[in-house]
Image: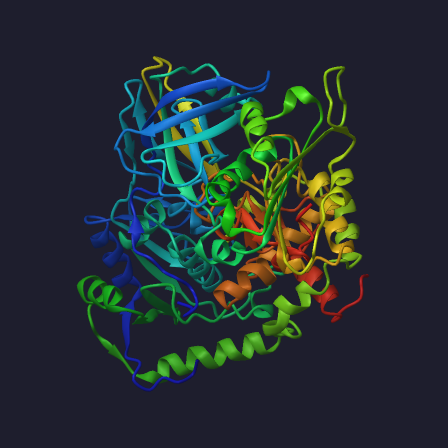
């Protein structure tokens, strides 16, 4: 055996999910629903922001879903799920009291090492569409102790005003003031939209950024983070000050099935949260 | 390899081996090389008489015994009772060849690292692996000699050397020692018989091209050839059928799927072989594909063999068994790809 490999004992529960009960459901858009669930065992998920769980409905299947709540919510946690396939469409039919099954949390999120590096910094969150969902775990966590950061800027872009996630929470964030700012933009505004219109990169020049003290955290579709990263690098932000969280279709969550592999990296093990400097040369990032 | 000091060798006649196999069959399921529709396959046998004497490369590798094409990992009921299913039975795998032994080493590590996969590992634990060394290259598609996988260090419990009228053997670990004493006896063999085998083997393999140029540096070579024209060129021929992956002894990617019984009261979660050469392998729910182009997929697969997994396992994850070469409808060969990438050969 190679000395570098971490060979563990066999784990008979690797693929065995645990039961969880839906405790809250709320529709956000035509496609997205918010779920709060509670593990039946009463254990706390004990996750880091940015981690994911494998959610299943028996008889339908299993899929990776981001955890949207900040850590330490006891045995309850939150997800926001877009109905795109058989599993997620089935999840959309569930109500309070129904059972789902959970494995995890999995992956490498914003762990203590990363969180320690954030204090005193200007945090620049940039979310596209449903990308706000995984980012919300960290956003809500840092808003709890906003005074330890120099500034918190949240840039959020959606295709239409109807696609905004957590709209009432966004309104709350907008009213915090002080060192917290929220800038929103939509691609296709309606008559009621009073904010900016266009693509998310239009918002970047509206934030005052000192590249030496700013940490950017980006979550969105590839076409979005590609251009956001280009703009941040143009502003002389160092690659190591940029974090991204990537979406891949994990089938196992434990570094075996190969579906999430991005060149040599298993996103389910080393990600989904990456320091950009680590993946900047990866050809399969976009 | 020719350090025979402190390596005890034993011997058993061919007839003795057949009797030993019949004895094993009382205690184990025995899988070995056997004829099926004019081909040879690794399959379970009921008697030593069913075992083929002449080795020809099989279509599927013995990985199927530890990582079946389809395997139940969970069973559940409509009431929500879920049970992990981990199946294994006492099994002897008789007569696997150096390429497949080296492939098994990669698989063992892949399933054991970080999260020990009980479905795979319990089958390995419950098995005795008896290898047979190769004295020569088995056919023109094999290229074990280019990745040194004709050499066996570990990966099996007992290794046999075919000396015509008899086998000599050595055990590779305690499990192999106990098994060999019980079924093969412990009649010693002088090192001369092994040395004679080895000399012939070295002479035969000496006539081949030998290892790839820069074999140990292939991960670095592949890392720096991601824009090489070969990926586009091979993509023009590749049919993205995934055959290469189905027959590969070191491919272990899988899909996970649920199946409900017809009564809708119970169901199973299965894992099945999957293939990174298939166009939807790296798709995500929203339809994005992270390896849309065939060229990206060929590059990925070859990098898994000679870069990503080679870094991890310190041996190429291609063992040169030649199965993908025989299975490919478009005549794509990893051997040729490596030779072009390293500059050893020009494209014909």
Q: Is residue A61 left or right of residue B128?
A: right
Q: Residue B141, percent across and down?
A: 62, 58
Q: Is residue A275 left or right of residue A187?
A: left
The quadrant of the rendering that contains the C terminus of chain B is bottom right
Q: Residue A232, percent across and down?
A: 73, 51
Query: Residue A126 falls in which quadrant of the image?
Result: top right
Taking the spot 60% from the left edge, 31% from the top edge, the residue there is A174
The quadrant of the rendering that contains the N terminus of chain B is bottom left
Taking the spot 25% from the left edge, 33% from the top edge, the residue there is A41
- Quick one: A210 or A47, which is closer to the camera? A210
Note whether residue A34 is visible: yes
Total marks in image: 0
- Quick one: A27 or B33, which is closer to the camera? A27
Query: Residue B222 falls in which quadrant of the image?
Result: bottom right
Q: Is residue A249 left or right of residue A12?
A: right
Taking B336 as reference, is A178 above or below it?
Answer: above
Q: Residue furthest bottom?
A: B5
Taking A100 as reference, is A245 above or below it?
Answer: below
Note whether residue B211 is visible: no
Q: Residue A43, percent across and down?
A: 28, 37
Q: Residue furthest front?
A: A178
Say how the picture is coloured.
rainbow
Query: Residue A282 falls in which quadrant of the image?
Result: bottom right
Q: Residue B151, percent across and down?
A: 47, 71
Taking the spot 35% from the left edge, 67% from the top edge, the residue there is B159
């Amino acid at each position: 055996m190679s000395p570098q490999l971490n060979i563990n004992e066999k784990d008979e529960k690797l693929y065995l999910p645990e039961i969880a009960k839906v405790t809250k459901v709320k529709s956000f858009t035509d496609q997205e629903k918010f779920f709060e669930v509670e593990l039946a065992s009463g254990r706390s998920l004990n996750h880091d922001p940015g981690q994911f769980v494998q959610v299943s409905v028996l008889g339908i299947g299993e899929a990776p879903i981001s955890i949207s709540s900040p850590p330490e919510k006891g045995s309850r946690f939150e997800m926001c799920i877009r109905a795109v396939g058989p599993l997620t469409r089935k999840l959309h039919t569930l109500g309070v009291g129904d059972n789902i099954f959970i494995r995890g949390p999995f992956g490498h999120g914003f762990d203590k090492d990363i969180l320690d590096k954030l204090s005193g910094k200007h945090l620049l969150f940039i979310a596209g569409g449903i990308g706000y969902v995984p980012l919300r775990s960290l956003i809500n966590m840092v808003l709890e102790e906003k005074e330890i950061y120099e500034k918190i800027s949240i840039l959020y872009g959606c295709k239409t005003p109807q696609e905004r996630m957590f709209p009432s929470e966004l309104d709350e964030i907008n009213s915090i003031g002080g060192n917290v700012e929220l800038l929103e933009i939509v691609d296709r505004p309606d008559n009621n939209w009073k904010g900016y219109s266009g693509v998310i990169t239009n918002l970047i020049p509206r934030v005052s950024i000192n590249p030496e003290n700013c940490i950017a955290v980006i979550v969105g579709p590839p076409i979005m983070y590609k251009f956001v990263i280009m703009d941040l690098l143009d502003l002389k932000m160092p690659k190591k000050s940029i974090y991204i969280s990537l979406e891949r279709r994990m089938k196992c969550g434990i570094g075996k099935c190969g579906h999430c592999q991005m060149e040599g990296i298993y996103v389910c093990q080393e990600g989904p949260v990456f320091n950009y400097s680590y993946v900047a040369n990866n050809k399969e990032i976009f | 390899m020719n350090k025979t000091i402190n390596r005890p060798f034993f011997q058993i006649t061919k007839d003795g081996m057949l009797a030993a196999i019949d004895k094993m069959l009382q205690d184990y399921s025995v899988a070995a090389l056997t004829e099926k529709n004019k081909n040879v396959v690794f399959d379970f046998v009921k008697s030593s008489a069913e075992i083929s004497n002449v080795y020809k490369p099989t279509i599927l590798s013995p990985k199927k015994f530890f990582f079946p094409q389809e395997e139940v990992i969970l069973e559940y009921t409509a009431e929500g009772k879920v049970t992990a299913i981990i199946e294994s039975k006492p099994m002897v795998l008789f007569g696997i060849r150096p390429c497949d032994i080296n492939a098994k080493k990669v698989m063992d590590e892949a399933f054991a690292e970080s999260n020990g996969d009980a479905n795979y590992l319990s089958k390995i634990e419950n098995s005795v692996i008896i290898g047979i060394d190769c004295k020569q290259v088995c056919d023109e598609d094999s290229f074990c000699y280019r990745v040194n996988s004709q050499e066996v260090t570990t990966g099996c419990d007992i290794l046999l050397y075919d000396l015509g009228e008899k086998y000599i053997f050595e055990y590779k670990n305690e499990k192999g020692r106990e098994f060999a004493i019980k079924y093969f006896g412990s009649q010693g063999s002088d090192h001369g018989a092994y040395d004679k085998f080895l000399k012939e083997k070295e002479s035969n393999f000496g006539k081949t091209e030998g290892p790839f140029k820069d074999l140990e540096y292939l991960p670095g070579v592949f890392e720096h050839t991601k824009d090489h024209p070969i990926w586009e060129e091979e993509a023009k021929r590749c049919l993205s059928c995934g055959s290469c992956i189905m027959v590969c002894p070191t491919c272990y990617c899988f899909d996970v799927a649920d199946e409900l019984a017809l009564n809708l009261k119970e169901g199973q979660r299965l894992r099945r072989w999957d293939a990174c050469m298939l166009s939807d392998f790296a798709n995500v729910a929203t339809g994005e594909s992270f390896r849309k182009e065939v060229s990206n997929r060929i590059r990925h697969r070859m990098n898994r063999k000679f870069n990503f997994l080679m870094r991890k396992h310190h041996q190429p994850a291609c063992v040169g068994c030649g199965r993908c070469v025989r299975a490919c409808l478009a005549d794509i060969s990893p051997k040729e790809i490596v030779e072009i990438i390293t500059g050893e050969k020009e494209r014909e």
